[in-house]
Amino acid sequence: MRVTKKNAEFAKVAEFNTHAFSGFSARLAVSWLAIALLLGHAGVGAQRRDPHAPHKHVLAWADVRYGYQHDVISHAVATIERLGYESGAYDTFIRTDSQPITKHGITFQTGTGIATGEQFLAHDLNYYDAIFFFGVREIELTSEQRADLLSFVRDDGRGFVATHSAITGFFSWPEFGELIGGRFDEHPWGVTDAKVIVDDSRFPGFKDFPTPVVVRDEHYQLKDFSREKLRVLAHIDPASVDLKQPLVHRTDRDFPVAWAKSYGAGRVFYSTLGHEPELWDTPFVQQMYFNAIRWAVRLVDGDATAVPRRQ
């Protein structure tokens, strides 16, 4: 199987109906079929939202002020927001700054609030059940904010779901590497096709993840991770990439694509996938991240026990 930009199923149906009808009728039929297929492929967002049901709160944190800004970030966080809203599983609060990364409240100077003297509405980490992180490189946090972020997951048992360039974050902060589970070590192949193999189809979001599947993305090489400390959920088939590229450093040919782990009392999920915009429109990638968030906020269970690599 291969992920492409075109929907082959829709193309075949549209072609059939164009021959079967003529003029306005044909165009109308194709339009309705397009809408039906888009709704059908929405998958995880197809449920009716219950406005009265309690929802989990997810902070989509995308602070990229001091690093490379991936153009896909807006589409990625918009997708995460839509999946949560349409399903009713969680509400997403999108921030491109780091003000909410504190457990000590957010206040404003006198005179900057509402005329009645009330403070602006601002949620700190105590409000959230999980963070969806699509940041990059060094992000300006105070020492108190850093401590609060670690405590949010480790001590409060909250969730941390991270995607793609998140693994490049905070190289100067060793504890963040321990939280997320590893470190970025280049993308030796640039944007390329690679075969992805699922390691654990029982984990939430991987039941319907095709395996093997060729995925076109900016595939990462990771370092400073240990399969003794986390559960790899999917990996790149090393036979599908050029291991002679000069930036390939791993002699063990181990290239994880997704993993889950515990960090103290909290739940952590990370996947390299997410550089290419088309991936965020791909049903099995949407399912992976949607269910990773559901797992992180404890709406579903999944085994994150570390599993050594099979020899």
Image (spheres, rainbow, N blue to C red):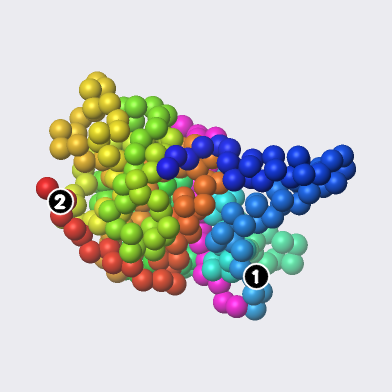
Circle 1 is placed at which residue position?
A: 48
The residue shown at (34%, 46%) is 212
Residue located at (42% from left, 39% from top): 215
Mark seen at residue 265 = none
What residue is shown with label 2? 310
Decide if residue 260 is in sight here.
yes
Q: Nearer the viewer, mark 2 or mark 1?
A: 2
Which x, y percent locates residue 304?
A: 27, 63
Marks 2 and 1 in Cβ contact (< 8 Å) = no
Amino acid type of the residue that numbered disc 2 sits on in the rendered structure: Arg
Q: Is residue 122 magenta?
A: no
Principal secondary structure, stretch drawn in magenta? loop
- The one nearer the camera, 224 or 235, is 235
- Using the image, determine if residue 1 lies above or below residue 90: above
> Residue 240: where, in percent of width, then height?
30, 33
Which residue range is magenta in the image? 53-74
Q: Position of residue 60 (x, y in %)?
A: 51, 54
User: Which quadrant is home to the N terminus?
Assistant: top left
Dot 2: few (<14), some (14–19), or many (≥20) neighbours within 10 Å?
few
Residue reaching furthest to the left: 311
